[in-house]
Image: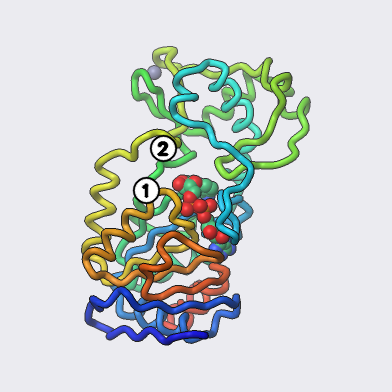
């Protein structure tokens, strides 16, 4: 059973306790209509997660059931504390990164950029590290967890592109990709490999100082840089609607923005297949696939270049 959430265009609703629930993937529903009206009033700040990129072929961590998949991501402590851990990471990600690097934006990313161009989206904060918002034309994206497109030296801070590092890794590990069998790719762009596969992999060092290179992403166990958090909170606090797209909100890094919006009485909309930790705080809740839903929403608002 659905309840209709009504927003007043042009005014910020302070009653964030309302909730619409949609349990079908068919986009044209009451809950989506109410969300569309709220987006049409502008001042939307998007917080996106891994679910926005699954339609581009990049796996997320938690599927529709909200249950974590069988994969334990590398932690910051494991990476910096162990040369073996780094060798394992780089060997696996040398193979898995290709999936991320060759992925292209989907209708969900294109809709968000089109809504931004139309002046309805005022800010985009992403938990994703795949660069697909920007590839779809979005501007001023706050990449909360960094980007896989860059690599940073932990000793001297020198940054190189991942493409350049890939060239060096290929030169240092001729034939490596042909000697191993890739059976799956994990969300953070690594693949399962045996210890024997990993053993011979040559790990690149910083060309400037010989230091440890790390992808420019925030690992589990690592803090998000303060300036990114501050910029995100500033966007959220000025929002008329906080719109969560494709995140289970299990990670506090994204969930805290929902908590802040709820505290300030800023309505929260969530489009996600399956449950999220923010559901009880959402004024608009659409449980559906993002590509078709956001396309429908944008076109309903006359934003047609999706
Ligand atoms: N693409 C990426 O860059 C990427 C991929 C995986 C993980 N990560 C990182 O891992 C963490 C994961 O947390 P999270 O909350 O972003 O992701 P999550 O995996 O916890 O949640 C993703 C949610 O999206 C839903 N979903 C998946 N496909 C969908 C679709 N097509 N339409 C609608 N909903 C869909 C899932 O059911 C799930 O509830 C983040 O911190 C992120 O940095 C990034
Ligand atoms: Zn260095």
Label 1 residue near ligand 1, CB within 8 Å: yes
Q: Identify which residue is drawn at 55% across, 80% down.
A: 27
- Pick whichever of labels 2 and 1 is earlier in the sequence: 2
Callout 1 secondary element = helix
Residue at the image point whose x is 56% and y is 71% from the top: 288
Q: Nearer the viewer, residue 102 or 57?
A: 57
* Mark nearer the viewer, 2 or 1: 1
Which element is circle 2 on? loop
Give the side of residue 275 with respect to residue 302, left or right: right
Please give the residue where the numbered disc 1 appears in the rendered image: 253
Q: Residue at x 37, y 63 (%)?
A: 46
Do labels 2 and 1 touch, CB within 8 Å? yes
Say few, some or many: other residues with alpha carbon within 10 Å of mark 2 (under 14 / 14 to 19 / 20 or more).
many
The Cα–Cα distance between marks 2 and 1, rounded to whole angstroms, is 11 Å
Residue 244 position, x and y percent, is 41, 63
- Image-quadrant location for residue 218: top left
- Mark 2 = which residue? 218
Label 2 CB-ligand 1 distance < 8 A:
yes
Q: Nearer the viewer, residue 104 or 3?
A: 3
Residue 117 is situated, as x and y percent measured from the top left of the image, at 37, 68
Identify whether 73 is placed above or below 277. Answer: above
Residue at the image point whose x is 68% and y is 15% from the top: 200
Q: Residues within 10 Å of mark 1 (few under 14, many from 20)?
A: some
Residue 209 appears at what percent x and percent y?
40, 13
């Amino acid at each position: 059973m659905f309840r209709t959430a009504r927003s007043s265009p042009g005014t910020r609703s302070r009653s964030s306790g309302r909730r619409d629930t949609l349990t079908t993937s068919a986009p044209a529903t009451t809950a989506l209509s109410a969300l569309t009206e709220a987006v049409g009033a502008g001042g939307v700040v998007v917080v996106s997660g891994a679910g926005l990129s699954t339609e581009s072929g990049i796996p997320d961590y938690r599927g529709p059931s909200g249950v974590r998949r069988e994969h334990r991501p590398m932690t910051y402590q494991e990476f910096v504390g162990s040369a073996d851990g780094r060798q394992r990471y780089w060997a696996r990600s040398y193979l898995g990164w290709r999936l991320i690097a060759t992925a292209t934006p989907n209708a969900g990313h294109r809709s968000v950029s089109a809504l931004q161009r139309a002046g309805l989206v005022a800010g985009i904060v992403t938990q994703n590290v795949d660069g697909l918002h920007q590839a779809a034309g979005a501007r001023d994206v706050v990449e909360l967890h960094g980007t896989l497109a860059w690599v940073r030296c932990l000793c001297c801070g020198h940054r190189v592109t991942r493409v350049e590092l890939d060239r060096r890794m290929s030169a240092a590990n001729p034939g490596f990709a042909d000697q191993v069998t890739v059976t799956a790719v994990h969300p953070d762009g690594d693949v399962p490999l045996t210890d024997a596969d990993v053993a011979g992999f040559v790990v690149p060092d910083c060309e400037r100082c010989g230091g440890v290179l790390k992808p420019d992403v925030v690992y589990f166990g690592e803090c998000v840089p303060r300036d990114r958090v501050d910029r995100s909170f500033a966007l959220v606090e000025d929002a008329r609607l906080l719109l969560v797209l494709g995140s289970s909100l299990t990670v506090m890094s994204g969930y805290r923005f929902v908590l802040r919006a709820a505290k300030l009485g800023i309505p929260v909309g969530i489009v996600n297949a399956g449950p999220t930790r923010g559901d009880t705080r959402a004024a608009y809740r659409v449980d559906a696939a993002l590509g078709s839903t956001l396309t429908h929403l944008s076109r309903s608002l006359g934003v047609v270049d999706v």
